[in-house]
Amino acid sequence: MTCRRLLLMAFVMLLSMAGFAHAQAIEPLPFADHAQELRFQELTRELRCPMCQNETLADSNAPIARDLRNQIFKMMQQGRSDEEIKQYLVDRYSGFVLYDPPLTAGTALLWFGPLLILICGAGVVLVAIRRRSNLGHETATDKKTPGQGPADLGDDW
Amino acid sequence: MNRLLPFIAFMLLVGLFGFGIWWNSHHDQNAIPSPLLDKPAPEFSLPKLYEPDQKVSKADLLGQPYLLNVFASWCIECGVEHPVLSAAAPTLGVQLVGYNYKDAPADAMNWLQKHGNPYHLLIADEPGQTAIDFGVYGAPESFLIDANGVIRYKHIGPITAEVMANEVKPAITAMLKEAP
């Protein structure tokens, strides 16, 4: 057997193993049509597996994730909307399961925290610029022509 | 003052880091607060583990408070809390109801034979469908349900001797004091 054939065989084996692992992870569900399958995939990607800290229901191989996927599938067959399905899960597992949490009093810090930090950072930068430009201004007035004044305050730091 | 500023900023970051470590070691990171607390327990109708043709519903258990303990033979941490439950069961003050979760009945019975059976009543949820209504996502989990069928307390993870003494028993005492 040539080296190339051996390599090819190993490659084929690897491929088939990958396929097997995938089949094990997520069993196929009998969707009515492709649109429903897409909707299912989108919905399960927006929902967090309660058991695992950072996996979506779509990705997780935990038993509870499998059960919840089946439950979501069942509810889709019953014609329930995405919102109803999300609410169903939130009622049982709290807002933890939502990767895109709604704006409530409890999640306000989550939503506006980054903005708050940005404002703090901007404040620090602003103070630093002011201070530096003041220093620069004091030394600049000795050399530059007077009267140019505040116009170039911002660009010499 | 200006020279101290970076140091102060650094100390603030150290403080934040320290708080993160303290916070993460003082609460169970896997525990999700249950939205079902202080709400009526979901309706259920599940077969008894030892008499599968007999069903137990929520209505059957109304009138007396109970501690519903979700366990399974495949669950390693259930073995950790089992001795604690067994020791506490006679003096618990409420019924201990075993909720066998996603388990083959034969496996559950073997497990109970090996570790002992402290439960007053055992119900089985092999498909795990009802457990979704309870917001169960693993085992062990325990619910304290009062005589009116309201969930008063929930613990996620094994009930250690510490949890039993500091959380479960006080919760039971408070509940019984309120509605004797």
Image: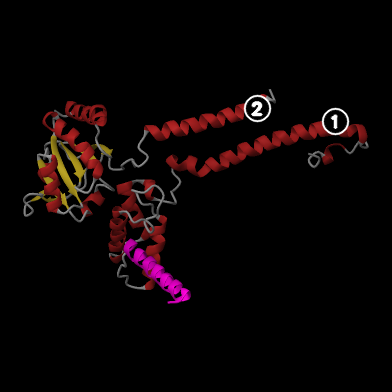
Q: Secondary structure at mark 2?
A: helix
Q: Nearer the viewer, residue A109 or B87?
A: B87
Tell whether A148 sits left or right of B163: right
Counting from the top left corner in percent of width and height, residue A145 is at 93, 37
Counting from the top left corner in percent of width and height, residue A35 is at 39, 70
Pointer 1 indicates a residue of which chain? A
The residue that disc 2 covers is B5
The residue that disc 1 covers is A138
C-alpha distance separating marks 1 and 2: 24 Å
Q: Nearer the viewer, residue A54 or A25?
A: A25
Q: Quadrant of residue A68?
A: bottom left
Q: Quadrant of the C terminus of chain A?
A: top right
Which residue appears at 15% of the width and 51% of the height? Answer: B107
Mark 1, residues whose alpha carbon is within 10 Å: few (<14), some, or many (≥20)?
few
Tell whether A57 sits left or right of B159: right
Pointer 2 indicates a residue of which chain? B
Mark 2, residues whose alpha carbon is within 10 Å: few (<14), some, or many (≥20)?
few
Q: Is residue A58 above or below residue A115?
A: below
Which residue appears at 12% of the width and 48% of the height? Answer: B110
Residue A12 highlighted magenta (yes or no): yes
Tell whether A10 sits left or right of A137: left
Which residue appears at 83% of the width and 41% of the height? Answer: A152
Look at the image and give the residue range highlighted in magenta. Answer: A1-26
Residue B116 highlighted magenta (yes or no): no
Q: Nearer the viewer, residue A58 or A151?
A: A58
